[in-house]
Amino acid sequence: KAGVTQTPRYLIKTRGQQVTLSCSPISGHRSVSWYQQTPGQGLQFLFEYFSETQRNKGNFPGRFSGRQFSNSRSEMNVSTLELGDSALYLCASSEGQGGSPLHFGNGTRLTVT
Amino acid sequence: GQQVMQIPQYQHVQEGEDFTTYCNSSTTLSNIQWYKQRPGGHPVFLIQLVKSGEVKKQKRLTFQFGEAKKNSSLHITATQTTDVGTYFCAAYSGAGSYQLTFGKGTKLSVIP
């Protein structure tokens, strides 16, 4: 099976812009989770989707949003970018049952200047 | 939400020495998972522990889940340079939660 695919791999944006990141899960996986990874804060949970429904949301401002499509592909959007949004954004898919292990993509490295 | 504390933050060992990282929670965990992230890579699932006192082995790696299901450890015997990376523990935030919360990780450096 193909792994989790994230696009693009790298992005450079300026403050105030918005960005959309894409994630294609492993075939058959219906759950997609998003994480922000920074050296100081580690892996921080953004949100989780299952069958197009957001089941959990982390402690991030409303500028961070996401959605999931009927084919389980997911996108996350960050509006009004700030310098502090520079990070590695990781998407992970799973079967979606409680306790399921996560399978991560390679991530999107976002730099905000 | 669920918090898992992981120590140490960094560990430098000579190749061939052993390494241990610890994960602690103030609440009882239903299960705990361990991941490894190589430099420049993404986290990769290693193992899941579910039962109280459970011990699982993967070659030189030994994983333990505490009797009270509030702590866990990962022990690597005779480290090799291929063990370099950051090791994370992770736990779901309570019953019915689909939020997997990660510890801050332990970054392992192996000196050849």
Image (cartoon, helix red, strand yellow):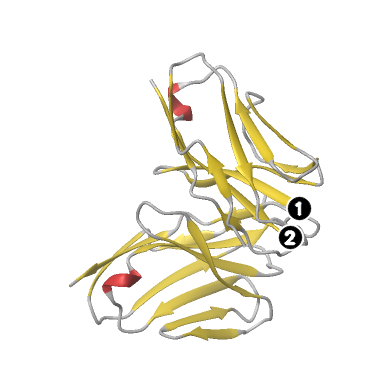
Circle 1 Cα neighbour tier, 10 Å, few/some/many (<14 / 14–19 / ≥20) = many
The residue that label 1 is drawn on is: A30
Q: Quadrant of residue A46?
A: top right
Q: Quadrant of residue B38?
A: bottom left
Residue at the (52%, 15%) spot, across then down: A17
Look at the image and tell me in which quarter the C terminus of chain B lies.
bottom left
Residue at the (45%, 27%) spot, across then down: A84
Query: Which kind of residue does numbered mark 2 sit on?
Result: Glu
Q: Are discs 2 and 1 located on one and the same chain?
A: yes
Of marks 2 and 1, which one's residue comes earlier in the chain? Answer: 1
The residue that label 2 is drawn on is: A95
Asked whether the beta carbons under mark 2 and mark 1 sit within 8 Å of each other, the answer is yes
Near-viewer residue (A73 or A67): A73
Near-viewer residue (A29 or A111): A29
Q: Residue furthest left?
A: B112
Residue at the (30%, 78%) spot, across then down: B79
Query: Which kind of residue does numbered mark 1 sit on?
Result: Arg
Point out which mark residue A45 bears: none
Circle 2 Cα neighbour tier, 10 Å, few/some/many (<14 / 14–19 / ≥20) = some
